[in-house]
Image (cartoon, rainbow, N blue to C red):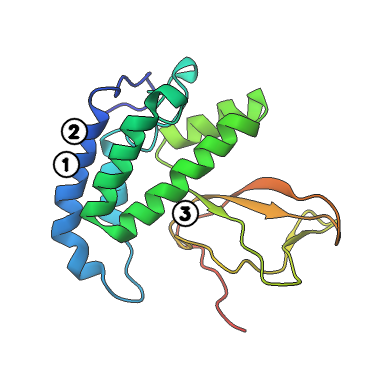
């Protein structure tokens, strides 16, 4: 499916999610290990248009992430999670990221990031900081610090992260571009 054209998945999204769930369920056992990741299942989400279906209708998507699509989105999430809980968690993070971008992104940001979703990039939300610490954006424009949870690390290619410029300042949301295979440092 060419995801660069507007999607009309309002009635197909549930059928697509069923197809993903069946395939994901068949593969779930082989991924149930510490280094497991449902990469083939994410590829199915992209191939069937579900990575781009969240994009608002007026921006070339199916509008599944908008209020009128909420019931269908809930069913899509339920089906995907039923097929593979790991895939459901990863897809839910992708959904959350695109919904945050739709709500808070500037028009140019939205256009660029939605194009990246259409191109098959997997988004995630990494916002949990350890107590008393936060990820900081340095003057060198590099991120310093840790996130407690980074679901999909190594596979998510666009991570929406919360950062602060300095302690006590209001948080910012940034979308960090990651290369496939980029791993988090799990050391203490």
Which residue does the image show at 32% across and 49% down from the upper left? 42
Would you say 31 lies left or right of 55 here? left
Residue wearing tag 2: 15
Residue wearing tag 1: 19
Q: Tell me whether the residue at label 1 lies in contact with that at label 2, contact meaning CB atoms closer than 8 angstroms.
A: yes
Which residue does the image show at 13% across and 58% down from the upper left? 26
Percent position of residue 89, x then y: 38, 55
Disc on res. 141: none
Which of the two discs, 1 and 3, labels the residue nearer the N terminus? 1
Q: Residues within 10 Å of mark 2 (few under 14, many from 20)?
A: some
In the image shown, does 171 or 27 lie closer to the viewer? 171
Which residue does the image show at 64% across and 32% down from the upper left? 105
Which of the two discs, 2 and 3, labels the residue nearer the N terminus? 2
From the image, state whether disc 2 or disc 3 is nearer to you: 2
Which SS class for mark 3? loop
From the image, state whether disc 1 or disc 3 is nearer to you: 1
From mark 2 to mark 3, how far is it between C-alphas?
25 Å
Residue wearing tag 3: 156
Which residue does the image show at 29% across and 24% down from the upper left? 9
């Amino acid at each position: 499916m060419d995801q660069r054209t507007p999607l009309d998945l309002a009635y197909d999204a549930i059928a697509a999610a069923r197809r993903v769930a069946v395939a994901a369920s068949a593969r779930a056992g082989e991924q149930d290990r510490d280094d497991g990741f449902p990469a083939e299942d994410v590829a199915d989400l992209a191939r069937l248009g579900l990575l781009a279906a969240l994009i608002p209708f007026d921006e070339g998507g199916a509008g599944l992430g908008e209020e009128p699509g909420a019931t269908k989105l809930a069913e899509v999430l339920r089906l995907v999670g039923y097929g593979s809980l790991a895939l459901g968690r990863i897809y839910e993070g992708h959904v959350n990221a695109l919904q945050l971008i739709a709500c808070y992104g500037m028009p140019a940001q939205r256009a660029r990031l939605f194009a990246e979703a259409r191109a098959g990039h997997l988004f995630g939300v990494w916002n949990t900081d350890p107590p008393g610490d936060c990820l900081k954006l340095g003057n060198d424009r590099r991120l310093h610090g840790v996130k407690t949870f980074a679901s999909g690390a190594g596979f998510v290619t666009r991570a929406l992260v919360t950062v602060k410029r300095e302690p006590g300042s209001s948080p910012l949301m940034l979308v960090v571009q990651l290369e496939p295979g980029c791993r988090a440092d799990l050391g203490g």
